[in-house]
Amino acid sequence: MKAVFVACDQAMYDSVMSLMDELAIRGYTGWEELIGRGSATGDPHLGSHAWPAMNSALVAMMEDEKASTFLSRLRTLDEENANQGLRAFAWNVTEVM
């Protein structure tokens, strides 16, 4: 099982949610308004006058195979919307209760 964390420009959030619906990824926890700045490229998203954009994020648990498909589709979504910004990270889940 994997935990997949997705952080993206707020403008991308609906697209990520649509992708999750398409892949039948149902359970998640999301945050609608986050600040941040990418480590390599992109402008800060600070919700301020100078940097008004904001980020959103979510984390979802899923089977390994579904996580692989989800990450691949997220990569494509990011490439198609390079100016918006989207990052995803996955790690192993060792216990579920």
Image (cartoon, helix red, strand yellow):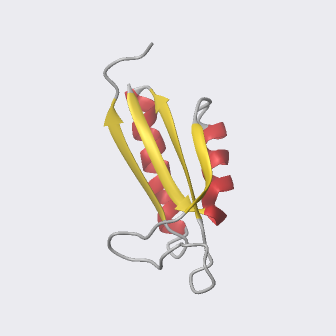
Query: Which of 12/55 is in front?
Result: 55
Residue closest to the far front: 48
Query: Which of 72/54 is in front?
Result: 54
The quadrant of the rendering that contains the N terminus is top left
Residue closest to the far bottom: 50
All told, the count of numbered labels is 0
Residue closest to the far top: 97
Percent across and percent down for residue 57 are: 54, 51
Percent across and percent down for residue 93 are: 34, 26
Percent across and percent down for residue 89 are: 37, 48
- Direction from residue 15 to residue 51 in the image, left or right: left
Query: Which of 6/69 is in front?
Result: 6
Percent across and percent down for residue 91 are: 32, 37
The residue located at (65%, 65%) in the rendering is 11
Up/down of 68 relative to 89, above or below: above
Query: Which of 84/94 is in front?
Result: 94
Quarter of the image holding residue 41? bottom left
The quadrant of the rendering that contains the C terminus is top left
The residue located at (47%, 30%) in the rendering is 61
The residue located at (32%, 73%) in the rendering is 40
Up/down of 92 relative to 59, above or below: above
The residue located at (47%, 66%) in the rendering is 36
